[in-house]
Image: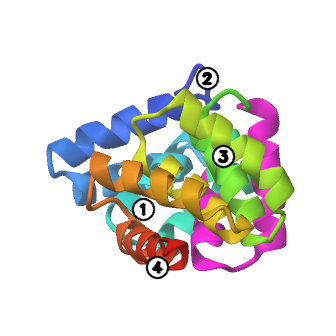
Amino acid sequence: MSLDSGNLDAYTALAGLYLIDHRLKEARAEFQEIAKRQPQSVAPAIMVGIISEAMGDRATAATWYSNALRIDPRSAPAANNLAWIYAEQGQKLDTAQQLAEIAYASLASVPEVMDTLGWVYFKRDMLGLALPILRRASEQDPSNPQYLYHLGMLYAKNGDEAKARSTLQRALAMRPDFEGANDARSEEHTSELQSH
């Protein structure tokens, strides 16, 4: 991370190690201390944000991603993750779009970044822009139910009930408890009723 502060996978992998060890509080405290000692480094601020998100504390995560962006306004990991939080909350969607586009400019081949930008476009009803990006994210990482869920919801909003139903069914078959699974089930059921 110190060599390449834009490497999203490095942050995710490190946070995953702490999650596996059930040491999130300890890890967050460690990275907060590092952030105090290295106030011009984005890496510790991003790590505090990622760990806070893993702990379910999106407000703290958003604060730390914002801190990282004050240090480096082009930080793709911080921009992507803050855009994601805003999109999930349905707030500051214009800012979310700007942030997601910053991340995408640097990490256009990363499915997670594609998905964030596509989901922000979806939330802003920019469905024509969202479709190719969400489709590409799900093609590049077909084992991620979240990407299929987003694509399925887009198909539903576009009125393509058959594609919505099959895409959402694939997402639920992969992992029935992903974030958004209840919405996927509800939309899938609605699609089935409308097709009869």
- Which element is circle 1 on? helix
Q: Earlier in the sequence, mark 3 or mark 4?
A: 3
Q: Foreground residue, 64 or 93?
A: 93
Q: Earlier in the sequence, mark 2 or mark 4?
A: 2
- Which element is circle 3 on? helix
Q: Which region shows up in magenta?
A: 81-107
Q: Earlier in the sequence, mark 2 or mark 3?
A: 2
Real-space Cα separation, disc 3 to disc 4, in angstroms: 25 Å
Q: Which mark is residue 193?
A: 4
- Which element is circle 4 on? helix
User: Is 14 rendered above or below residue 101?
Assistant: above
Amino acid type assigned to the residue bearing label 3 in the image: Leu
Query: Left or right: 144 with respect to 29?
Result: right
The residue wearing badge 2 is 4
Q: Earlier in the sequence, mark 2 or mark 1?
A: 2
Real-space Cα separation, disc 1 to disc 4, in angstroms: 36 Å
Q: Determine crowd level at label 1: few under 14, some 14-19, many 20+ residues with C-alpha closer than 10 A.
A: some
Where residue 130 appears, as percent x and y from the top left, is: 76, 53
Real-space Cα separation, disc 1 to disc 3, in angstroms: 23 Å
Q: Foreground residue, 22 or 123?
A: 123
**In front of the other: label 3 or label 4?**
4
Q: Determine crowd level at label 4: few under 14, some 14-19, many 20+ residues with C-alpha closer than 10 A.
A: few
The residue wearing badge 1 is 53
**In front of the other: label 2 or label 1?**
1
